[in-house]
Amino acid sequence: MKNKQILKVSTTSSRSSKSRRQFLKLSGMAALGSGLLIACSDDDDMMNNGPQPSIFDLGSGDLGVLNYAYALEQLEADFYTKVLNGSYWSGANEIEKQVLQDLYNHEVNHREFFSAAISAAVGENISAKLPDLEFDYGGLDFNNRNAVLGTAKVLEDTGVSAYNGAGKLITDPGYLVLAGKIVSVEARHASAIRTLINPGSADFAGDDVVDPATGLDRAQDPSAILAAVGDTGFIVTPFTANNLP
């Protein structure tokens, strides 16, 4: 569990957080059409099926999936960076501090992995790579244990279902193997967070995420995942996913 340097980031945005929906609404994911737009400066403007020539589109095929995963990993890495800069983490017991620092390290590694993989895939066509995203967590209190762990739980559960749902879209066996390696780590994260919230319980693999009849975790299409993430208002930078299901 080698520690990495913790990046200091701004935790205050000048953007208004009015009308921002609560992150726990992610549990009510709803599938939307493919013309998804994440643009979170105003909740009323988050969906737009019209042409967006100046808005980055994730693309199609393996590149579209890589950009999609890169967006989610940027969000997770940024979230845990802010967690480790909050007073909850600094005052948490050693077990919780170590778990959250490990998750931070993993997510930063995942983000950098996708950044490098996409750069290698697009070569000089850097316009095909998702840019660095900007985030705004509104009133989320990173000094509050319940707020941090509750948000982490939804993020990790969402990440697992996102990778499960995107697997069928990957054609390159090499990418598919790597996605499997990452989703297994994300599932460990989800279990670790659930255990911190409710120690000694069966929540680590609860029936809400693992079907007791099949033993299989949830799988969600990119449109459903991005709709739910967009609904939080956490991702400020707009982009579209017009070529992903």
Image (cartoon, rainbow, N blue to C red):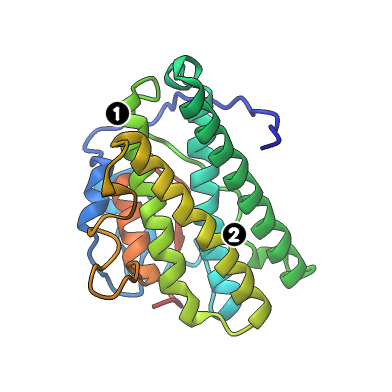
Percent across and percent down for residue 165 are 41, 72
Tell me which residue sits at (60%, 46%) in the image. 106
Residue at image location 47% in from the left, 82% down from the top: 168
> Where residue 206 sits in the image (x, y, percent)?
27, 55
The residue at the point 71 percent across, 64 percent down is 117
Quarter of the image holding residue 178? bottom right
What's under tag 1, amino acid-wise?
Asn
Looking at the image, tell me whether mark 1 or mark 2 is earlier in sequence order. Answer: 2
- Kindly identify the amino acid type of the residue bearing the numbered disc 2: Leu
The one nearer the camera, 11 or 95, is 95
Checking the image for residue 232, the label placed there is none
Q: Is residue 210 left or right of residue 87?
A: left
Residue 108 vs 164, above or below: the answer is above
The relative height of residue 7 versus residue 222 in the rendered view (above or below) is above
Q: Nearer the viewer, mark 1 or mark 2?
A: 1
Nearer to us in this view, 111 or 125: 111
Q: Secondary structure at mark 2?
A: loop
Q: Is residue 161 at all visible to an observer of this figure?
A: yes
Mark 2, residue position: 130
- Where the N terminus falls, by quadrant? top right
| Residue highlighted by disc 1 | 146
